[in-house]
Image (cartoon, helix red, strand yellow):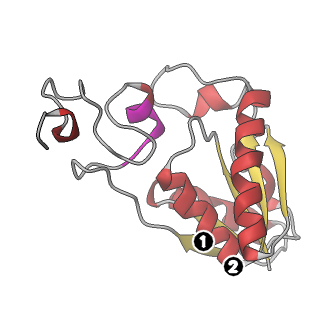
Amino acid sequence: MKVALGGTFDPIHDGHRALFERAFEVGDVTVGLTSDDLAPTLRDDDRYVRPFDERRRDLEAELEAFAEEFGRSVEVRRLDEPTGIATEPQFDALVVSPETEAGGKRINEIRRDRGVDPLDLEVVDHVYAEDGEIISSTRIVDGEIDEHGNLTPDSDGRPHPDDIAGS
């Protein structure tokens, strides 16, 4: 199967890794990475997003390990529009998060309108940080958590348990 997924991936975290893992379980993977122009239009906040070339380099390094582990091919392509590459007829499945599931349904509407079979939507559940909240790039950039969802020492004004002597 040919699988698509897309995003900004800045920074990459365990929630993204769950998406990647599911994609590689299903088939050969093409990842659409938002362009520098598109990325800010998809955000509810106005935080800094690193340039495309930097994000692509880090994403490709991350994906190569998954491709090798699962014996699959991988390609990273630039996304210039929100529906991205998934409207292209060669794809069979789209990996989405609960937040992007509605976008996946919209992509399937576009595909139907074009006479193309709908994609299988693979919805991957959230990955949660140690505080029970969803891991997100924004939380990482804001210094609340690290890429694995561990609370940072200053995230809530209290020291992290690992930083307390005798722990």
Identify the magenta region.
Answer: 135-140
> In the image, what residue type sits under mark 1?
Arg
Quarter of the figure with the N terminus: bottom right
The x, y position of residue 152, in whole percent, is 29, 32
The number of callouts visible is 2
Residue at horizontal 56 percent and vertical 36 percent from the top: 11
Quarter of the figure with the C terminus: top left
Residue at horizontal 42 percent and vertical 33 percent from the top: 140
Q: Quadrant of residue 96?
A: bottom right
Residue at horizontal 31 percent and vertical 50 percent from the top: 129
Q: Does 31 sit above or below residue 49?
A: below
**Tag 2 and tag 1, C-beta contact below 8 Å:** yes
Residue at horizontal 31 percent and vertical 31 percent from the top: 144
Query: Does 42 sit left or right of 66 as displayed?
Result: left
**In the image shown, does 64 or 49 lie closer to the viewer?**
64
Residue identifier under label 1: 22
Pick out the residue farthest to the front.
166
Q: Does 125 sit above or below residue 78?
A: below
The x, y position of residue 112, in whole percent, is 75, 71
Residue identifier under label 2: 26
> In the image, what residue type sits under mark 2?
Val
Q: Does 142 sit above or below residue 124?
A: above
Dot 1: element: helix
Q: Dot 1, crowdedness within 10 Å: few (<14), some or many (≥20)?
A: some
Q: Quadrant of residue 37?
A: top right
The x, y position of residue 161, in whole percent, is 16, 40
**In the image shown, does 105 or 78 lie closer to the viewer?**
78
Residue 54 - label:
none
**In the image shown, does 163 or 36 lie closer to the viewer?**
163
Pick out the residue farthest to the right.
90
